[in-house]
Amino acid sequence: MRRALACLACRGSILGTAGTTLSDFLDRSAGLGYAKGSFILMSLLVGGLAVWH
């Protein structure tokens, strides 16, 4: 049980880091700004959940 919880915590931290990195890239490097970058990330999240469902 502890091993499974540790694995889930690790995945959450990896996904959180990846999301932050992608958000920073879209906002700053790609020059899209906060609103457009947030819209793209939210669209990817909803699309991923729709495919998963």
Image (spheres, rainbow, N blue to C red):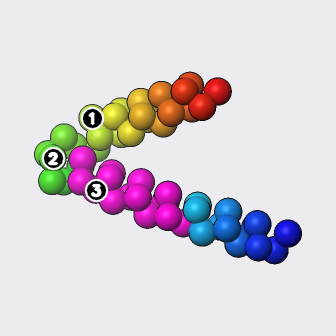
Q: Quadrant of the C terminus?
A: top right
Residue at 54% over, 66% down: 13
Can see residue 30?
yes
1 lies left or right of 31: right
Q: Quadrant of the N terminus?
A: bottom right
* Cα gap from disc 3 to disc 1, whole angstroms: 12 Å
48 lies left or right of 26: right
Q: Are marks 3 and 1 in contact (CB under 8 Å)?
A: no
Residue at 22% over, 43% down: 33
- Mark 1 sits on what residue? 36
Between 48 and 21, which is closer to the camera in this rendering? 48
First in sequence: mark 3 or mark 1? 3
Q: Position of residue 12 (x, y in %)?
A: 58, 61
Amino acid found under the numbered disc labelled 1: Lys
Between 4 and 26, which is closer to the camera in this rendering? 4
Query: Does the segment drawn in magenta span residue 50?
Result: no
Provide the major secondary structure of the magenta segment: helix
Amino acid found under the numbered disc labelled 3: Asp
Between 7 and 41, which is closer to the camera in this rendering? 7
Query: Does the segment drawn in magenta span residue 17?
Result: yes
